[in-house]
Amino acid sequence: MAQAPQTGPFMLGIDMLAARGFDLLRGKRVGLITNHTAYTSRGELTRVAMKRALGPGLVALYGPEHGIDGTVGAGKHIATRRDPVTGLIVHSLYGPTRKPTAQQLAGIDVLVFDVQDIGCRSYTYISTMVVAMEAAAEQGKFFVVLDRPNPMGGWRVEGPPVESRWKSFVSQIPIPYVHGMTVGELAMMTAAHGWISRAPKMTVVKMQGWTRNMTWANTGLRWHATSPNIPHVMSPFYYVATGILGGAAAVDIGIGTDNPFGYAGGSGVNAQSMAAACQGFGASGVSFSPYSRNGFGGVKLSIHPQAATDLTALDVRMLEVLNRLTNGRALARMSGDKLNLFHKVAGSDSLYQNLRRGVPASRIIAGWSGYTSSFRNSRQRHLMYA
């Protein structure tokens, strides 16, 4: 069930819980899935606020990909260690296991999730939440989600479905590439649709004052880099716009620059040709400027927070152009683990196969429209915010 909304200023799930004196957790042994992104509106780490309020009642922490401090690179395994901030053990959920084990959950009654997501299926924080929900159900633990904003807002729904054979930690549940939901809404939808083998007894502590047309900039909250390559408030938008094409061969998406995911280039590509092709897309709210660096040429993107353009479609359109301008090398040179990861992120191998066969990107994108429309309808009863 979702906690009922109240009236007043903007408040995160953690703020709402604190305002009620942490009533859901009093007298319980609490485990907290969290990281460096989980702050109160006043700028205090959730784990610090909960430790102060609950004392010995907060007994364990659990960290997702990138670690509890958010400094570990993408895909790198993390060891269980002690948190220097609270002194508690941080069980790694991105190492030998990604789903909390019975042993890791043995000492708790309630498992709380408070992590800032970015709103894209391939970002693993929602996968951590989903498998933790399943683990909580299996071990008889109550599950609580402290809700947070979707930084891209609540309307943007884009991209292809996930085929069951390509289910993975970067496509853990069958949702579009961009889902337009909060983590709390996704948790409720996951339980209701049977996307996990067992659903836990659970509650979502809602935010106050968030609406679906709010991007992060509208919240007034400070942005904390959710991972090393998502440093800015607009980084989630760029992640969607180039994240898929970034899995191709001999491409550059700006990793290592001041705007990771803010570039789309290829080895030996003529920057002016790439810019001309992108400008021809008529991408509302997105502009392109040519760049060249380190033997790569392409475009630097500038995305407006309210851009009407389908950013996942833009990703595929730019991949099609880059593949053409590299004479097919961007796709043809992919193999092994790299190609496998590309399919997992895309949710199927059909994107790769269709582009290799020369199917126009416009036709590929049009093939998603029925699915995204169906998803909008099916998600409706799980939406908690106006």
Image: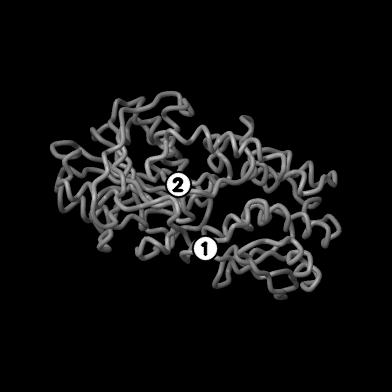
Q: Residue at x 18, y 45 (%)?
A: 22
Q: Residue at x 73, y 39 (%)?
A: 350
Q: Secondary structure at mark 2?
A: helix
- Establish if 162 lies above or below 275: above
User: Residue type at mark 2?
Assistant: Tyr
Q: As drawn, is 88 to the left or to the right of 197?
A: left
- Establish if 368 lies above or below 283: above
Q: Which mark is residue 305?
A: 1
* Image quadrant containing the N terminus: top left
Q: Residue at x 51, y 32 (%)?
A: 378
Residue in the foreground of this view, choosing between 256 and 322: 322
Foreground tag (2 vs 1): 1
Residue corresponding to mark 2: 125
| Contact, mark 2 vs mark 1 (Cβ under 8 Å) | no
Q: Position of residue 11 (x, y in %)?
A: 28, 54
Residue in the foreground of this view, choosing between 81 and 367: 367
